[in-house]
Image (spheres, coloured by chain):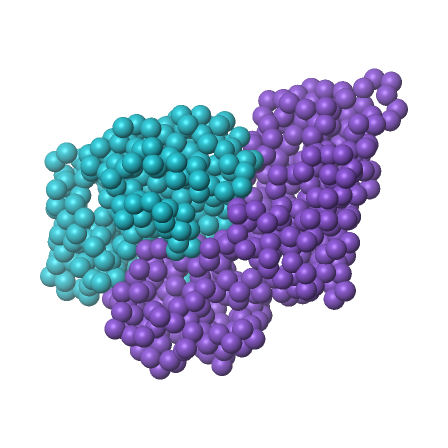
Chain colours: A purple, B cyan
Amino acid sequence: MADVTLQREKINQAIQILDELQLDCWLTFVRETGEQPDPALKLIFDQELTWHCAFILTHTGEKIAIVARYDDDLVKQGNLYNTVFTYTDNFASVLVETLTRLNPSSIALNYSIDDVAADGLTHGMYLQLVEALKATPFPERFTSSSPLISRLRSRKTSQELVRMRQAIQETYGLFDLITRSLKAGVTEREISDLVHAKMANRSLGSAWSYDSCPGVKFGPNTLFGHGIPGGIEIEPGFVVSVDLGVSYAGYCSDLQRMWYLRKPGEQNVPEVVSQAFAAVKGAIEAGKAVLKPGIQGWQVDAAAREYLVQAGYSEYQHALGHGVGRYAHDGGPILGPRWARYGETPYYTIEEGLVFTLELGVMTERGYVSQEDEVIVTAQGCEWFSQPQDAIYVV
Amino acid sequence: MADVTLQREKINQAIQILDELQLDCWLTFVRETGEQPDPALKLIFDQELTWHCAFILTHTGEKIAIVARYDDDLVKQGNLYNTVFTYTDNFASVLVETLTRLNPSSIALNYSIDDVAADGLTHGMYLQLVEALKATPFPERFTSSSPLISRLRSRKTSQELVRMRQAIQETYGLFDLITRSLKAGVTEREISDLVHAKMANRSLGSAWSYDSCPGVKFGPNTLFGHGIPGGIEIEPGFVVSVDLGVSYAGYCSDLQRMWYLRKPGEQNVPEVVSQAFAAVKGAIEAGKAVLKPGIQGWQVDAAAREYLVQAGYSEYQHALGHGVGRYAHDGGPILGPRWARYGETPYYTIEEGLVFTLELGVMTERGYVSQEDEVIVTAQGCEWFSQPQDAIYVV
């Protein structure tokens, strides 16, 4: 139950955000959360539940849980909810009674077109809510909780920031291990295995799919995108790019670093690589210069994208950055182009306190040259949350 | 990519089941599966994906994946799908083209009122499908994939059964550790910590919420249900009940065992405990005697429930059993009472090859007396899949 303080902070934040958004209540409706987790649930109740459970927070500060017998001990132990109703057979009647008493004019549910972090309600569970409430006016009052959840994730508490900084520190340690391990003949997979072993040793989770975290790219013939590190061996003259994030106490990092393996007798990094590195850094700085509260994410992406194209490189085929937090892709605003794939998220307004990645890369004849760091939005702009790589690590 | 053979077997099973059920196609539609996993996806593609992906299987044997750039390498590496379409901006047009070519008269989607294992499609993703296909006749052809997924999970391949047996063996090892560790003054939490350390050492996952797996109950004042093991110390004269499942290579076990800590000079287990143990075993045997292909799960539960009540004990407030597989609660038929909480699942027909738990317990003045084992359904009936506890372990 180590996380209960953090959950209490987030519950109180949620109540305040309900008030700000003039939403009457937020209903999180889940079952078998080990199998079908709702990404929003962890923020307000970080245990697994078996049967149908409803967590209701209201703008007036009510904290209500409707839980099945056998799940109720877990909920009572946490002491996060003032009112805990236990049912044996069917959640519907106590839910109808509770909502009838509250009579909310709006009920925010966890579904969202654009924001996966606010889209934890399954379609089957949605149909059950509609059925349970069919004799009431409440289904007409459903609305997406996406604006609420986006703010709730974005506004990191001090305890959340401490964990995220620690995740970054742990990631640096893993990059150091890679620096010590790179030599001609080592394969992408061997580097990945080394990092995995050290992660287990440090009790770190992977910030995304274990098999492709770290993403390790050796030289120009590596698989691109989210592939699994394979049998490619590093050769002198190759660029190495590693995309790595760890989960520390439930919070993630997401960073990219690069190395160059010198050829015999070679003093410096080849110009094609150093120029690409400068362009990547310049583009990221161009985005960072624009990032501040009140603007929209696509404007930040556009600044970086334009810089890169002006420098003579191809556009990157993804977003410049995304929120980081409980997940490496933590939902909320995207610093991305106005492509259909990103829906409305590039149009979300940036708030102070958000932590974003800034990331991009270009392919060269020596390999993939890329960088990714994290920034935190301040009142006037943003500042580095991780310490960016100043120069290519030469090994 | 160790699991690819298993996934290929499940994909071929799915195509056969589509044909059996006279369904034309199965569409699994996901995004950011690290954050919002679809429990059905792992069966047919066991890697995490970032952007909107559609996996389409047809009764004629087509295997189609529509994936975003950067996710496509992962999908191509697996070589499970004959046709892989890569999109950069928007999945909708290639999905419309593909479905128009296939022109299926039914499209099974992963939503279900009753079966959480078949309810991985979020409401937000459902709304996006409807929007993407709004100019087509396909939304009217949507149907629940629940009957398909129930069969697909239930029909364990030989490789799946090997993993499940290994998970059971590992669980026995953990029970032995508990036997060696129980003595007066040890707390529930200490036992839980010991088991967790050994699980980490053996690279085993927990089959349900880590904090309450194992569930450890000491004596008559333990928290009931899914609580977290706490500070209660074992005293002579206490019954100890442990509910434990591990995940081995992606497949779970789910077993309960019990112990009795003798008082000084005590020879035998007190009659109140041994009688309860006999009643619990008898009730489980009564259920097992009824379980066979073709009947419905509630009939199995009713046989055990009636036996227990005839023996003078209170009814258990849960189902007698559930399917086990990738999850401890693996969906499909429930061997449970006809309560609203279980929806239609107690009415599902039992098939050969299914693996179920049989579990129940009664509270006594010395503690919770319970047992849980696994059985596999055979052509004529069922047989033990785990080896049931014959007598209370006395320590």
As rendered, which of A335 and B248 lies closer to the eye? A335
> Residue B11: x, y in percent?
34, 31
Q: Is residue B155 left or right of residue A99?
A: left
Q: Position of residue A327 (x, y in %)?
A: 57, 52
A199 to the left or right of B101? right
* Nearer the observer, B180 or B350: B350
- For the point 41% across and 47% down, the residue is B132
For the point 25% across and 41% down, which residue is it? B106
Residue drawn at point x = 36 percent, y = 30 percent: B63
Examine the rendering and report whether any part of residue B28 can be seen: yes
Point out the residue furthest to the front here. Answer: B135
Tell me if residue B240 can be seen.
no
Of residues B383 and A378, the one nearer the viewer is: A378
**Residue A266, located in which quarter of the rendered image?**
top right
Residue B57 position (above or below residue A303): above
In the rendered image, the quadrant that contains the C terminus of chain A is top right
Q: Position of residue B67 (x, y in %)?
A: 48, 36
The image shows residue A104, relative to residue B370, as above or below, that is below
Q: Position of residue A247 (x, y in %)?
A: 60, 49
User: Residue at the location (25% across, 66% down)?
Assistant: A89
The image shows a total of numbered marks equal to 0
Q: For this view, does A235 lie left or right of residue A43?
A: right
Vertical placement of residue B126 versus A110, above or below:
above
Q: Looking at this view, name the residue that lies furthest to the top.
A: A264
